[in-house]
Image (cartoon, rainbow, N blue to C red):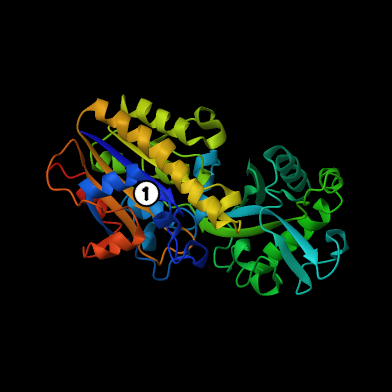
Amino acid sequence: MKYVIVHAGGMADHPRPELEGRTPLHASSTPHLDRLAQIGELGQLVTPVDGVRHGSGLIGAAILGFDPRKFYQGPGPLEAASLGVSVTEHDVVYRCTMVTLRPEGGKGGDIKELGPHVIMDDATAGLIETEDARELIEAINEALGSETIQFYPGAGHRHLMVWVDGKARAVCNDPQTILGQSIADALPTGDGADILRKLMDAAHLILRDHPVNEERIAAGKKPANCVWLWGEGRAVMWPSVAEKYDIVGTVVATSDVYRGVGMNAGLEAVDPDRLVGGDLRTKATVALEELAKKDFVYVHAELTDEVIHGTDIKAKVQGIEEFDRNLVGPLVDGLAKHGPYRFLIICDQEEDPRSPAFYTFGEGGITGLETVGRRFTEADALASNMPARDATKFVNKFFSKN
């Protein structure tokens, strides 16, 4: 038996007036997902998130059986695992996101210090390229790095800061939640916040006149004139899913967070060089190559940053259709050649883990009753009248030998 989990990150949504009251999934043509929903169980998954910091990777941890209340400490430590950054349980790892700030009615270079007069203009620094961002992070680390503070380059606008023996009780916020707004109420607060604010202020002074940003402005691009510290947490040891269920598995993901989720769970991680560009067909091909050698593959895929953070809802529909056509279709076709297999497809609103995710679960090649006309949509999952399942316990059903 082969086991496959496909996690469609962030593709669930609310009904949209632009789509005549339908969700993007409902408005999309998804024959492969619909087929799986017709032959499998369709329902909702809830994740226990009371008292848990929300952030990327939380749903992934729950899917693999880890209660976020115990094991999820924020996306920072997961990205550190993916990037091979060595941390101890006493260190605090922060997401260090490149952002574009602007003063009210002025240019970015006029900002003297971070405060109520500063607006979050872009939470990705114009989707900054990795090469530019790496040079900027290295400049920050050279100036601000020490025995206790270190900055590590990641990809695009996403990077890391490690505070050795740091304080983990500061309250930090996702920069995406304050787009177009003053940063005043979103700056770090609580124990250790003074140090974090000083680091952000100092980083702004380093970045605002950096040659890379001067070149970006001249080219009509947004400057990465500050770093935003958030997504903090300490590293926590997870028990191995591979050992618990006696399987050998791999995570196929371009996201550092989800690579970290898989690695923390005892799975191997596909070399990023095999997934260059994040092409969906490439992910399907690599997943099938891994299944030829392994028992289990966890595939994470999400829409591009341009679609997730953009306002073009039709682009989301197009992205969902490409997900169905280029990932799910080839994967299901290839799985049939491997013999019996069990599948679990999960779709969530990643920015809001409190909203139920929905899923379809079943076994390929099993004949029986089919729910004709059923689709892989939020509405059909709700209409199935299945009791909502605890996401952290579903893995036991998924790997059950029965």
| Between 33 and 339, the one nearer to me in the picture | 33
| Between 8 and 330, the one nearer to me in the picture | 330
In the rendered structure, the answer to whether residue 124 lies left or right of residue 355 reads: right
In the rendered structure, the answer to whether residue 101 lies left or right of residue 217 reads: left
| Between 13 and 157, the one nearer to me in the picture | 13
Q: How many marks?
A: 1
Q: Residue at x 72, y 45 (%)?
A: 137
Residue 306: x and y in percent read: 61, 50
Query: Compared with residue 196, is residue 81 higher up or lower down, i.e. above or below?
Result: above
Q: Residue at label 1? A: 238
| Between 83 and 17, the one nearer to me in the picture | 17
In the rendered structure, the answer to whether residue 42 lies left or right of residue 217 reads: left
Residue 115: x and y in percent read: 76, 72
Q: Quadrant of the C terminus?
A: top left
Query: Compared with residue 172, is residue 185 higher up or lower down, i.e. above or below?
Result: below
Amino acid at circle 1? Trp
Q: Callout 1: helix, strand or loop?
A: loop
Residue 177: x and y in percent read: 60, 66
Residue 218: x and y in percent read: 87, 46
Residue 188 shows in this picture: yes
Q: Residue at x 45, y 61 (%)?
A: 13
Give the image quarter of residue 83: top right
In the rendered structure, the answer to whether residue 379 lies left or right of residue 341 reads: right
Q: Label 1 crowding class (10 Å Cα cut-off): few <14, some 14-19, many 20+?
A: some
Residue 46 shows in this picture: no
Give the image quarter of residue 179: bottom right
